[in-house]
Image (cartoon, rainbow, N blue to C red):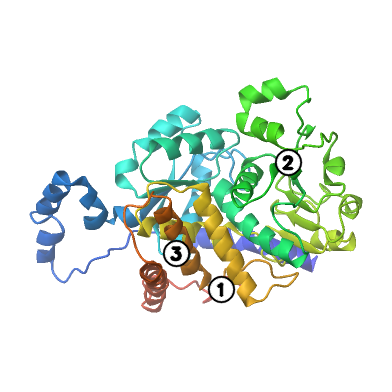
Amino acid sequence: MGGTKEVDKPYELAIKFAKFYGGKICVAPYVPVYDLKDFAVWYTPGVAEVCRAIQKDPEKVWYYTNRWNFIAVITNGTRVLGLGDIGPEASIPVMEGKALLFKYLGGVDAISLPINVKDPDVFIETVKRLEPAFGGINLEDIRSPDCFYILERLRKEMDIVVWHDDQQGTAGATLAGLINALKLTGRNLRDAKIAFIGCGAANIANARVIEVAGGNPKNWVFVDSKGILHRDRPDMEELKKKNPWKYEWAMRSNEEGRKGGIKEAMEGMDVVIAASRPGPGMIKKEWVASMEKDPIVFAEANPVPEIWPWEAKEAGARIVATGRSDFPNQVNNSLVFPSVFRGALEVRARTITDEMAAAAALELAKFAEEKGLREDYIIPTMLEWEVYPRVATATGLKAIEQGVARKVFSREELYSRCEEKIKEAREQIRVLMEAGVIRAPPEGKIYG
């Protein structure tokens, strides 16, 4: 029972402090105010000169306003965490938490912006109308397959960075861990045989970014709720119309023509990447035992992985990763999205490409390798804050290389800027806490 109480503790504390603080984020000024006269500069009449300058040259908005570091965390609440379609209002605590992570880990100013729109086309038009206000859009918790359509169109039709964390963030963290797991087991990305369990936002993006990094889809097998994807499956024409993104992988993967379910998909494979329904029991021990020698198991469902790590290990898994912080090798989006946005915003990028996500993953993997790879350490942890400016720099440099950046920096210049902004955010929070502007909780601590 003690273990159960410990698992439930975050829920109890979250409710308690949500009531105490009334939210997680607020607006704080960048500029000093010594006297009310200062508003003649910050506001009228002085501000008119800034407006005229931007009117003459719209690009100056990136230098004279906070747009360059300001993003919106946007959702319609149709697939929030493991809670499903709970609506935009109930999604606000998650979006606020995301905004706090953006600030603390990446120095990015983010606001929670749930919108009451389910129709994908109306959602897209709504977000496009917000473009003048923001330097970037973080899409969050949108149901599949709408999320693919929305991201695809917004990346094409907006001239600022647009990112769907459930897709690209998960993919970046997964790729980083996978690269190092393959190294530890003497494999390479090109030849790795991978079973993808689940064909939602996470695994479709996992596959996309892994291919960009050098993986070969011919060696892969995908499984959805109806079984293995293969060209002869009776529902392929229907799938082509309703979910062309999944259909594409059905056509490009499974060269050997496997049929069946999860069991058949995993047999003889090097890697299983599961991003499906919470377990335990979604993946059985005997299925892991049927994989190649020293198999790699990524069980990413939350709050409970598809198979418990110890069960996978007992079945012969050499390396196991999950989405949980209380197990080794957490595949953690929070290692990716703050850094990617930091780097993209610094260079005033016009988009975030899959190549930029792959570059972030490669730097994450490199950082862990330099620290010393182990079977229980294939990816950095959130405590290793030094990784954030490094990943941000790698992302920004890739944007420059691909010609989607408005500003160009050297590696040294970009790293210095990213590091300074991240340190500044942490220092701001520390000073506000010490001054009592951010109230201390009644017991003097949040957790523990």
Dot 2 or dot 3, earlier in sequence? 2
Q: Which mark is residue 393?
A: 3
| Residue 212 spot, x, y in % from top left | 59, 48
Identify the image quadrant of the C terminus: bottom right
| Residue 58 spot, x, y in % from top left | 21, 46
Q: Which mark is residue 384?
A: 1
Is 127 displayed left or right of 257 in the figure? left
Q: Nearer the viewer, residue 413 or 96?
A: 413
Mark 1 vs mark 3: give the one in front.
3
Dot 1 or dot 2, earlier in sequence? 2
- Mark 3: few, some, or many residues within 10 Å (few <14, many ≥20)? many
Q: Is residue 94 visible?
A: no
Q: CA distance from mark 1 to mark 2?
A: 36 Å
Q: Amino acid at mark 1?
A: Glu
Dot 2 falls on a residue whose secondary structure is helix
The residue labelled by disc 2 is: 218
Picture layout, residue 250 above or below residue 56: above
Picture layout, residue 230 above or below residue 277: above
Q: Amino acid at mark 2?
A: Lys
Q: CA distance from mark 2 to mark 3?
A: 33 Å
